[in-house]
Image: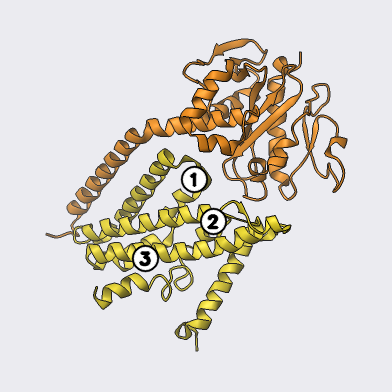
Chain colours: A yellow, B orange
Amino acid sequence: MNAKLKETILNPIFKGNPITVLVLGICSALAVTVEMKGACVMALSVIIVTGMSSLVCSLLRKTIPNRVRIIIQLVVVALMVILVDQVLKAFAYGIDKQLSVYIGLIITNCIVMGRIEAFALMNKPIPSLLDGISNGAGYGLILIVVAFFRELLGSGTLFGLPVLSALGYTNNGLVILPPMALIILGCIVWVQRAIQKDLQEK
Amino acid sequence: MNTNSNIYTVIYTSVVCVLVAAILAFVSQALGPRQQANEKAETISQILTAARFAEKAEWDSRGNDAVLSFYKENIDSAYTIDATGTCNGTLNVEDAEIVTVSGLKKQNYLIKDAAAAPALPVYKFKNGVTVVPIYGAGLWGPVWGYIAFDKDLKTIVGAYFDHESETPGLGGKIKDDPSFRESFEDNQPDFSSENIFEIVKGGAPKGEDKKDLADNKIDAITGATMTSKGLDEAINTWLNAYKPLLNR
């Protein structure tokens, strides 16, 4: 594997993470991080959508008329999202019910469109696919970290299994609400900036 | 080729749209029956949970087929009634025909319209338990559920509620908190009072027995005032519509 491809895959996971560095996709990160299960499915769905739509847009990149490229991208993304939604409805009904609105909202997730605009339209299909997948994974990673704290402190459980609640922990209602997700997210950004000195403004 | 010409742009977008539409139509056709089967089994498992045959999680783990066959084995009759309580339709038991959530939504409009003739479903099981649905608006979206009555059609033996987008951990507790559902048990709607059934705030101070509340009152969920209110309204509207059946 050459160095450039490796960079494409590894960069979005930490150094150029779409949520903590590019600050994209915050809205859904606040909404679907109440429980681990939902966050995991959302992460997987976003990985599939970003990967597939980057691949398709990259394949089409030489044919897409420049003036309507955003619309074409939107159509491709919407197609992928509806496909994911339909498949979940047929094969994982319980999880689809839980995520219902948010699956549809992947369309508006800036990461998907952002990566197509910034990467897929200028690169070959395979690197684009990998870029989409790893950006989705970078997003998913943050989602799961936030969900870990929110489910643990808010409901005392992990994946619905009692952890803290078994020890007589009183659930913290604030953690369940979106503001706490923003605070946890802020803490993650803080930690990352402390480690990654080049992100700090002079 | 000039990809920026008007003709190219129009043709390109048209082709993309038609292609995408075709793919979606095909997928929807191919997965449709499976999705409907899922929705039906989900609804039936909610009805069975309300009637206290087993917990919801158990139905989910048993799978669609087991839910359907259990329903068919235990259902006595399923039919619809109008505003006067007269039977105006039967639901095929062999096919496990039921009214799904979208059907309840439609009935919810008809209930509020005095001139309309609603077809409200009633599920009567062989052990005498009768289940009726409710539907209404929560805080963020619709809430619905099923209330099961004992043989006398007065005492509630169980309830199950579901919602589309209530806040997990707060309003979402109408579905997720078993103790909320259990608090409906052994209560009785009171058709002589203004509020047939009430979900009250501060009904059960800490440490006190919830049974201190009147039979048609239960304690609301802390931090979910609007959801509790919406559910209260849904229950009152629908039980009122079922008055001819339940208040004999």
Q: Where is mark 3, residue-wise? A: A134
Q: Which percent across, then down, holds residue A115?
A: 35, 65
Co-location on one chain, circles 2 and 1: yes
Q: Nearer the viewer, mark 2 or mark 3?
A: 2
Q: Amino acid at mark 1?
A: Ile
Q: How far is mark 2 from mark 3, CA to CA?
A: 20 Å
Quarter of the rendering containing residue B87: top right
Residue density around tag 1, few if under 14, some if 14–19, many if 20 or more, within 10 Å: some
Q: Quadrant of the N terminus of chain B?
A: bottom left
- Identified by mark 3, the residue type is Ser
Residue A85 percent location from the top left of the image: 41, 45
The residue that label 2 is drawn on is A36
| Contact check, label 2 and label 3, Cβ < 8 Å | no
Question: Mark 1 falls on what kind of element?
Answer: helix
Which element is circle 3 on?
A: helix
Image-quadrant location for residue B234: top right
